Image (cartoon, rainbow, N blue to C red):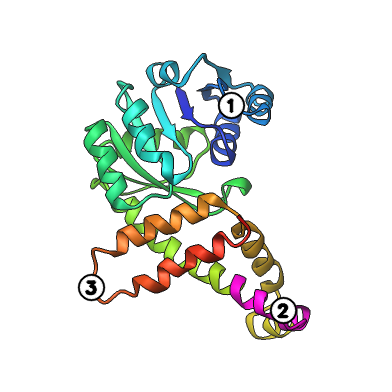
């Protein structure tokens, strides 16, 4: 089994490590990438091809795991090149997912990673008629769950989860920013630990540190807004305002 990755950031490298440990061959390309990416590809013993065109044409499963803003272009440029299965794992709206599906065709599968990909406890949710072709990766160490044969269902769950998680993160960021200005940051944290439980201290700090100054999360909120525009009685303005929390230090 040969799995190709377009892009080689945290998600791609984490999944690659699991797949390689279980006997899967991984291909990608470091052409034009950072020194850090080049070193990571070499460290994991990923087969480094000349460019992503070659990656798309020489794998059984092609996976895109990038920033949301690049997802559609990657689907257009590389997903349509492969003769095999193309899996999108980006945090994009169902609208963007369907746009990719219209370009790639029947070999497209919609995916969502649920859980922390860094600790090997994540589950990849899949939707699409060819989702069963991705499910074979269970034999190579990944946790897979097929939810339907309809493109877009995995993306819908992904966006709904993001509304909750990023809403909580944005609220934490703004609350602790105010507490910091009042010089009550530590005391606020101690009070919340009492009401929310012992794990809150670590979980809240992790949410804030992983959210502030991240362009990826800012782009994900834009995808959320795009998704919610199709529904009535939804406070778009509130969701849209979350973007400001994630770009506070840009």
Percent position of residue 80, x then y: 29, 26
Considering depth in this image, is 107 or 37 the residue closer to the camera?
Answer: 37
Contact check, label 3 and label 2, Cβ < 8 Å: no
**Relative to 91, residue 100 above or below:** above
Q: Which of marks 3 and 2 is nearer the N terminus?
A: 2
Mark 3: secondary structure: loop
Q: Gap in Å between the C-alphas at discs 1 and 2?
A: 40 Å
Q: Gap in Å between the C-alphas at discs 1 and 3?
A: 43 Å
Mark 2: secondary structure: helix
Q: Dot 3 corresponds to which residue?
A: 232
Position of the N terminus, as image quadrant, is top left
Q: Dot 1 corresponds to which residue?
A: 33
On screen, residue 41 versus residue 98, left or right, reads: right
Position of the C terminus, as image quadrant, is bottom right
Q: Residue at x 24, y 45 (%)?
A: 149
Considering depth in this image, is 42 or 135 the residue closer to the camera?
Answer: 42
Residue 181 — which label?
2
Residue range (magenta):
173-188
Q: Does the magenta stretch include residue 178?
A: yes
Depth-wise, is mark 1 or mark 2 nearer the camera?
2
């Amino acid at each position: 089994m040969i799995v190709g990755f377009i892009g080689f950031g945290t998600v791609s490298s984490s999944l690659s490590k699991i797949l390689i440990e279980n006997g899967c061959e991984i291909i990608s390309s470091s052409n034009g990438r950072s020194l850090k990416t080049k070193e990571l590809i070499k460290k994991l013993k990923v087969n480094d091809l000349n460019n992503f065109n070659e990656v798309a044409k020489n794998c059984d499963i092609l996976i895109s795991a990038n920033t949301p803003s690049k997802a559609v272009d990657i689907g257009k440029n590389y997903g349509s090149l492969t003769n095999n299965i193309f899996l999108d794992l980006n945090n994009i709206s169902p609208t963007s997912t369907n746009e990719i599906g219209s370009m790639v065709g029947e070999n497209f599968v919609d995916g969502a990673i649920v859980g922390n990909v860094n600790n090997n406890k994540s589950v990849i949710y899949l939707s699409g008629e060819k989702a069963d072709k991705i499910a074979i990766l269970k034999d190579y160490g990944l946790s897979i769950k097929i939810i339907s044969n309809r493109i877009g269902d995995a993306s819908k769950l992904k966006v709904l989860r993001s509304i909750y998680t990023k809403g909580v993160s944005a609220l934490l960021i703004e609350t602790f920013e105010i507490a910091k200005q009042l010089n009550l940051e530590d005391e606020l944290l101690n009070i919340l630990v009492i009401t929310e439980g012992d794990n809150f201290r670590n979980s809240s700090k992790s949410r804030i540190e992983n959210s502030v100054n991240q362009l990826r999360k800012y782009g994900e909120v834009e995808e959320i807004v795009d998704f919610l525009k199709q529904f009535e009685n939804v406070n778009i303005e509130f969701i849209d305002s979350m973007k400001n929390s994630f770009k506070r230090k840009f």
